[in-house]
Image: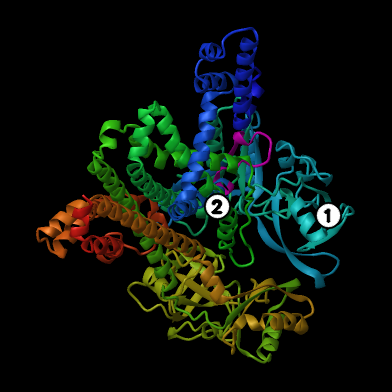
Amino acid sequence: MSLWSRVANIFRGEQLTREIDEEQQLHIDEAIGEGRDPSEARRAFGATLQRREESRDVRLFSWLDSLRADTVFGWRQLWKRKVTSAAAVLSLALAIGACTSAFRLIDALLLRPLPVASPERLYSVFRVGNDIVDNKPASVDSWAYLSFVRMRAAVKDQAELMAISYSQRLDLTYKSDQEMEKANVQYVSGSMFGLFGLRPSTGRLLTPNDDLKPGAHPYAVISYDYWTRRFARDPKIVGRTFRLGDTIFEIVGVGPASFTGTETGVVVDIFLPTMMHPGATKDDWTWHRTLAQLKPGAAVEPIRAKLDATSHAFEEERAKGFKGMTKETIAKFLEQHVAMAPAAAGASDTQHDYHLGLIAMGVLVLLVLMIACANVANLMAAQASSRAREMAMRVSIGAGRGRLVQLVLVESAWLALLAAGIGGVFAWWSAPFVVSRINPPDNPVRLSLPADVRVLAFGAALTLVVTLLFGLAPALRASAVNPANALKGGSDPHARRRLMHALIAMQVAFCFLVLFVAGLFAGTFENLSHRPLGFSPDRILTLETVAEHAATPVYWDQVADHLRSVPGVDKVALCGFPLLGGDAWNGFVSVNGAPPGPVLAYFISVSPGWMEAMKIPLKDGRDFRESDTSPGEALVNENFVKMFFPNGNPLGQSIAKGSTNYQVVGVVGDAPYKNVHEPTLPVAFVPMHAVDGKGALQTRRTATFIVRTLTANPMAMASTLRREVPRARPDFRVSNIHSQADLVNGQTLRERLLAMLALFFAGVALLLGSVGLYGVLDYSVLQRRREIGIRMAIGAQAGAIARGVTADAFLMVLTGAVIGLGLGMASVKYVSTLLYEVQPTDPAMLAVPVVIIFFATLLAALPAVIRAVRIDPARILRSE
C-alpha cells in the first residue's frame, strides 16, 4: 500500500472500517462457498474486532491515527470546559502576542539584515575613548571626510569604505520657492550602490565617477518609497530638478523598492554624492558615518589596526592647529581608538537610543509569558487530577505512557495554537502602534515590519516552546498515574499542590520583578517630566525660518516686527535655534585672558526680549539692547558663573571663545540647553546681530522666531504665522513650526514609551498572577473539603480554617517576593542607563510592588476562604 494511501486512510476512519469488515466477510463467504462450515470459517478468521485492528494497522500509520484521535478528543475536552479554556487561551494569547510584537520590533531595528549584497561583511567604524569633558567612556561614529579618504586608501586591498552622512530633514523646492517642502536627505559615497549590489528601478544610480570632485556632480537618486509617495511613480521622474540651498540637483534615477538607506528607523528620500556636501573639504567638520565592507576572507583586526593608525595620524596632524584647548584636553582627545562592530542591520541613532529599551521590554514580555505558562500549567495540573480515574482506565486497557503524554500534550497544543492565532492578531496591531509612539517632532520613526518567514518561524517556535513549558510537566504527571491507587481514589493530592505552589512562587517572583522594573521606568518618566525647566514652554511657538538668500539683520527684524502686529501674538524674539531642539554650539573658553580650561561652554545667539519671551529670569545685570552685537556683550547662566567665576562677580569681566571676545553684562537663570537628561550646562547667550572684523553686520540665512501667543493652544496660530512670514518678506519661508511644549515632550519619548509599556505589562502580570493564585487556592479547597469539614465538625473556627487554607500559598507568595526582590536588585545594573534620578533602593520604590502584591494576594485568596468557611460539615460527612 502506498504512503499516500496510508496517510489518506487516517481521515476516512468509518469508511475504512466498513471496507475492512466487508473484505473479511467476503473471505468468510468464499470459505463457506467452498463447503466449509460457517461457524468453523468464522472461527478460522478469528475475532472481527481483532482482525479489524490488525488490518487498520497495515493500512494506515497507527501513530498518526492515534494523533488524529487525540486531536479530536483534545478539542472536545476544550469545548467541554469553555470558560476555563477561554481564560487559558486569552492569557496565553496576550503573552504570545506581546512576545511576537517585541520580536518584530527587535528584529526590525536590531537583527534584520539590510537588503544588500553580503550584509554579514558590513561593519560600522567608530572611535572609543573617554569623553574630554566628564572623562566617562564614550563612542563617536562621526568622521571628517578628509580622514575617511586616508582610511579608505589605507585598507583598499582588504575592505571597501563608504561614507554615509546622517540623514537630515532639509528644505528643498521643486519649480519655485512657493513649493518649499522637506525631505530626508543623505550624502553617500558614489560607490555605495555598486558595493551593495543594488539595481535601479528606473534611470541609474550614483557611481564613483559622481563622487570625485567637490561640487562637480549635482546628481540625485531618490528612493522608491519617496518616488511612490511624492511622485506617484511618475515614469518621467528622471531628469527632473530640485533646488537644495543654492544648488540645483538633477534626479538621475530611482533606487530599488527594497532599499531605503542604511539608517535603520529612517526612510531616506534623496541620496546625494558626498562630494556635494559642504564639509567634504574641511578637516574639522565631522558629519558622516563610515561603513566598511570587508572583502571575502579578510579579517577584522588587521583592518581595524590600519584604520586606527591612519586615523590617529590624521588627528595628530589636525590637533597641531587646535586653539582654545589645553594640552591635557588635546592629549585626552588623541587617546581615542578605532573600533569596528557588525552592521548587517545598518547603523542609526534610533538603534542607539532604543536598543536597550527594546531588550528590556523583551525581557518583561518574556516574564509575562512565563507567568501565563505557569498559570496554564497549574490549570492543566488541576485538570489532570480530576482526570486521574480516566487516565487509570486508559492504562488498565493497555495505553502506554507515551500515549498518555501525547494525549495531554495535544490538548496543550490546542491551547497554544488558539492562543498563537489570537496573539498573532495582537502582534500585527501592537508593533506598528508602538512604533507610532516613537514620533520625534517632524521626523517619525519608520520601521519595516513585514509578517514574513522570520516572524512566522519565530511564532511557530514560540508556540512549540509554550506548549512544552506549560504542558510537559502535567503530561508527565498524568502519564505516571498508578491505576490501582487512582481507581481506589488514593492519588496523592499533596504532590500536585506542591507543584502548584512552586509555580505560584515563580509567578510571584516574576510579577515582583516586572512591577519593580515598571516602577523604575515610571519614576524615570515622572522625574524627567517634572524636571524644573527654568523657562515656561506654554503658549510658545518656534518658527524655524529660512531666507532664499542670506539676509541682513534688518530684514529679520522687519519680519519680527510684523509678527508682533498679528492678533493673538504676545511677544516675538529671535534666536539661532530653539532650546531642546537638538542643536548645539560649543567651545572652550578663556576668562579674562587666562588659558582656556578643560570645560566646554555652550553658546546660543538671541535677540533682545528673548529672555522675557521665554520667561527666563534675569538674576543680575541687564538684558541685551538693540545696539549690542556679537562679538561684544554676553549674558551667562548661573551654572556658567559656577564653572568659570566661582570666586567673583562675572559682570564686566571678559570671556573669549578662540579669538572672539565678549564682556558679561548679565546673569540669567539656568535652563536645559539641548537635552533634559543631562545636567544643566554652562551657557553663554550672545546677540543675534553679529559683525565682522570691519564692524559690518553679517547676514544669515536661517534663524528661529520665538512667538509667545495669547491663546492657550499656540498651534492654533501655526498656519496664520506661516502665512504671515512671507507676507512680511516674500523671500522668507517657515521651514518648521513646533510648540516649545512639543520640543520638551519630544525629549522624553523613550521614557514615556518605556513607562507606558512597562506599566501595561505590569498590570497584565499582576492580573495573571492573581488569577493563578486564585486557581491554586480554589483547587486546594476543593481537594481538602473533607478535611475542612472534619475540622469544622470538631470545632475549628473560621479564622483557623482561613489560615489553614492560605498558609502554604502565602508562604509561597512571600518566598516569591523575596526571590523577585533579589532579581530586581540584580537587574538594575542592566537598565541603569535608562533611568533618571531614580534610586532602586529607595524604600518607596521597593514598597510599591510589595504592597500591590499583598493586596492582590488578599483579593485572590478571598473567594477561596469564603468557599472554605461555608462548607457544610454534615453534608460532607454524609457524602463520605
Left or right, residue 415 beside residue 156: left
* Disc 2 to disc 1: CB gap under 8 Å: no
Q: How is the image coloured?
A: rainbow
Q: What is the three-letter code of the residue carrying label 2?
A: Ile
792 to 617, vertically: above or below: above
- Residue at the far left in the pictured view: 794
Q: Secondary structure at mark 1?
A: loop
The image quarter in which residue 705 lies: bottom right
Quarter of the rendering occupied by the N terminus: top right
Residue at the disc numbered 2: 422
Left or right, residue 525 beside residue 17: left
Between disc 2 and disc 1, whose residue precedes?
A: 1
Left or right, residue 127 beside residue 520: right
Q: Secondary structure at mark 2?
A: helix
Q: Residue at x 14, y 59 (%)?
A: 792
Question: Few, some or many C-alpha atoms within 10 Å of disc 1 (few <14, some 14-19, many ≥20)?
Answer: some
Residue at the disc numbered 1: 233
Q: Nearer the viewer, residue 379 or 650?
A: 379
Q: Is residue 598 visible?
A: no
Q: Position of residue 168 (x, y in %)?
A: 66, 59
Magenta range: 108-123
- Residue at the far top in the pictured view: 35
Q: Position of residue 373 (x, y in %)?
A: 40, 47
Q: What is the three-letter code of the residue carrying label 1?
A: Arg
Q: Position of residue 279 (x, y in %)?
A: 67, 54
Q: Is residue 202 visible?
A: yes
The image quarter in which residue 605 lies: bottom right
71 to 435, vertically: above or below: above
Q: Position of residue 642 (x, y in %)?
A: 37, 71
